[in-house]
Image: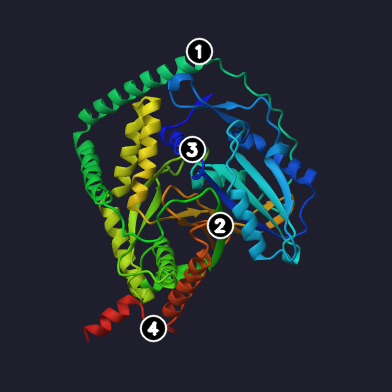
Amino acid sequence: MERLSPLDATFLHVEDDVSHMHMGLVGVFEGPPPAHDQLLASIESKLHLVPRYRQTVRFLPLAAGRPVWTDDPHFKLSYHVRRTGLPAPGGDAELFRLIGRVMSQQLDRARPLWEWWVVEGLEEGRWALIAKLHHAAADGIAGTRMIARLMDEQRDAPRPDPVSWTPAPEPRQAALVGSAFADRARWAVGETRRAGGAIRDPKGSLSHAEQMLRGLAAYSGIVRSATPTALNGPVGPHRRWVWARASLSDVKEVRSAFGGTINDVVLAAITGGFRDLLTSRGESTARPVRSLVPVSVRARDATGVYDNRVSAMFAELPVAIEHPVERLGSIRNQMTHLKDTHEAVAGEALTSLTGFAPEVLLATGGWLATRAPQRSVNTVTTNVPGPRVPLFIAGRRMLEAFPYVPLGSQVRCGVAIFSYDGNLGFGVTGDYDTASDIGVLSAGIERGMAELVAAARGKGGDGRPAARRAKQRTT
């Protein structure tokens, strides 16, 4: 039995009939697809490596504490791994429609919170795998590691025999309530010890406090409403989804030419996509598009821990800037400033403050935390690093991978980025009724990246590296 963290539990509390809090990954594989029994055997042989896939959420009576993960005594792998097919011709449009339908369905809370869908019938004999995982179980990085552990790094990897598994006995209600009070007592003791540590190390504590205060000051500007656009408003339960592609080597080439980070380059391309989307809708691009940018605070050695360890920063995407290199420069300067103000540190501190909150208050606070800020942002852009090497399942190589990001209330489209085997896959999620044109956004992302690459190679606009331009201005 393992208790959900405050942040993990929040993703359960904020879920409703229209905001489904599962994330996802779409992998495209070489064909032919494996037989279903072969695929199940491949997964089952490694299922012991990801215990969360056999666990379900158990809520406490009278909201006495946060929910816990318990073994599912009725676990059936065949329920979670499903198979479907595309109508001819099995192109991108048909796949996108299917993904939108699959992602529009809420996960069953009475069972472990994940599903895999095998999709046959893609062009060129390929097949796809749609993976769904509730955000309460993991953040993007941990969720990616879960999927990777069920796959292989070699085509002909040996297939071990399944490890025998017997579910732990279900805890009784009294034990659940008692453990909740014990956890709160341990939390209080831990806070007391941390306070003692602050006394013993006043300089370190003051430094951390200074960083948090600077971050909170930066956060204070986020409570104001974002620029009103059709990017915000009520959403329904149904989703649309499309993808976009980029080469990681191209992104690195742009970074080398103009400075910044890989994430800066990616945000610049996404900014170009939103500029195209707003322009196509006849909306003004004079004001920036404010995006929530999740930031991992996971320790490098926390490779076997599956939960949510994220904070957030808020970026103003400069859609008013027409020139792609100038857009990149604006984002680079802004992200440097956000890191200097320690927004992510403040965000992590705010989420940790809920550790001692009674469950009923946590539920209410989680609802407010994810809905009130949604009126202060226009979109979400999240970048998840994936495996750098090719992965295989049942001997089939995953050729490409694209992420899925859930939509919160009032946010009608979001963008997720996933790096895999030298490429970047963009997954664009939109509300079915109000964002039917997200294809314009995905095409704009690819165009924005192409413009940056052309500029880096000196083929479009002013493609000279920033240092060389500065030198020429001074001579």
Callout 1 touching callout 2 (CB < 8 Å): no
Q: Residue furthest bottom?
A: 475
Mark whose residue sits in front, 1 or 3: 1
Side (left or right) of 185 relative to 220? right
Callout 1 touching callout 3 (CB < 8 Å): no
| Residue 112, visible in the rendered structure | yes
Dot label at residue 461: 4
Callout 2 touching callout 4 (CB < 8 Å): no
The residue carrying mark 2 is 240
Figure quadrant of the C terminus: bottom left
Element at badge 4? loop
Q: Nearer the viewer, residue 19 or 451?
A: 19
Mark whose residue sits in front, 1 or 2: 2
The residue carrying mark 1 is 174
What amino acid type is highlighted by mark number 4?
Gly
Q: Nearer the viewer, residue 231 or 5?
A: 231
Q: CA distance from mark 4 to mark 3?
A: 45 Å
Q: CA distance from mark 3 to mark 2?
A: 27 Å
The residue carrying mark 3 is 307
